[in-house]
Amino acid sequence: MIADFTAKFVQKFISSPGRCCLCQESDSYGLLCAACDSLLMANNAACVRCAVPMQLNVARTHAEPLSAASGVAGYLAGSDPAPELIHSGEVPDSSGHGNLVCTACIKNPPSYRSAIVPYIYGFPVDFIIHELKYSSRLEFGRMAGHLLAREILRLWPTLKEDIDCVVPVPLSLSRLRERGYNQAFEICRWLSSQTGLPVETRLVSRTGHAESQTRLMRQVRWQNLEQAFQVSGKAEGLRLLLLDDVMSTGATLESLASALTAAGAASVDVCALARTPPPVPPVPIMVEESALSL
């Protein structure tokens, strides 16, 4: 009887090898088929510093197409200059993460240099993350890691030369015992398999028991995460890429980046699979090249 139940459970809830994890219909090596992949909502017009989705009626002042050095890699290297923007009916293409900076980041730059968050939090990404996070479907960690690695490598071809290791956002010990795994680590290990970057889990720990941030207001999130992380390893001189599943207000990644920067990290960049859009998307403003400093 137990064996029958287990077989039915596996058949119903675990994706079949070689089948799409969502629709189970098409051959996709256990990831997404082309039809389901096309449903992903790309976070195209996003701030390069915090990845917040911005109003789509924004385009570069440059008339020429984005160069190969554009995007996050070009922005960090200085080959893609400060985002001088105008309002128009055009929308930057999917390689344009290096185009835009929101007013909030100009006024109050985050502790990290850049954020790569390729998708908007909506179907099917919300389903992928929910199943991974709350239903113990670890196969969705593989899917999320592959999707994130695909977009990061497209936007940042020199990633392996520029980053020393990937750091998944840690859970508190009580949350880890309750869930049994860290969803950020599950994504991270599959991203590592695609990028070749090592995963570092002993560098930082979470202090105390942080309340779930999912339903909290923005200001409360920031207050809850003040001094939420403790650096327990040697961060000095390391070039770090922090990874979380979803980026909402950015409070978690900001708190972690701040702690690692204070501990002497040479650079900190962040990534997540999806970004929660704000109620009113911000509009970027025109800035001089000297207005941004990393």
Image (cartoon, rainbow, N blue to C red):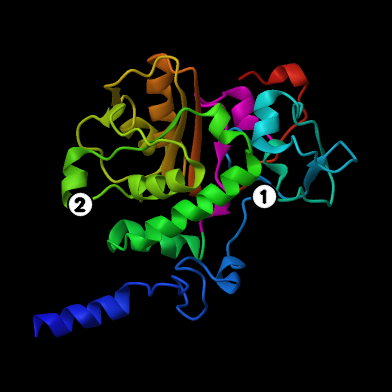
For residue 134, above or below residue 193: below
Residue at the left extreme, as displayed: 1
Q: Confirm whether residue 53 shows in the render.
A: no
Q: Secondary structure at mark 1?
A: loop
Residue to which mark 2 is pinned: 180
Residue at left offset 47%, top offset 27%: 164
Residue 277 placement, left or right of 59: left
Mark-to-mark CA distance, 2 and 1? 34 Å
Left or right of 205? Residue 55 is right
**Residue 46 image point, x, y percent:** 64, 43
Q: Quadrant of the N terminus?
A: bottom left
Of the 4 image quadrants, the one containing the C terminus is top right
Spot occupied by residue 132 in the image (x, y as percentages of width and height): 34, 59
Amino acid type of the residue that numbered disc 2 sits on in the rendered structure = Gly
Task: Between residue 151 and residue 291, name the one nearer to us.
Answer: 151
Residue at the image point whose x is 85% and y is 43% from the top: 65
Numbered range of the magenta stretch: 100-121
Residue depicted at x 78% and y 51%: 91
**Tag 1: amino acid:** Asn
Residue density around tag 2, few if under 14, some if 14–19, many if 20 or more, within 10 Å? few
Q: Residue at x 65, y 26 (%)?
A: 76
Q: Quadrant of residue 173?
A: top left
In this view, the residue farthest toward the right is 63
Q: Is residue 62 shown to the viewer in this render?
A: yes
Say whether residue 149 is magenta.
no
Quick one: label 2 or label 1, which is nearer the N terminus? 1
Q: Answer whether residue 108 is magenta in the image.
A: yes
Q: Nearer the viewer, residue 144 or 209?
A: 144
Q: Position of residue 153 (x, y in %)?
A: 59, 44
Q: Give above or below for 7 relative to 265.
A: below
Residue beneath disc 1 = 44
Against 141, residue 167 (above or below) is above
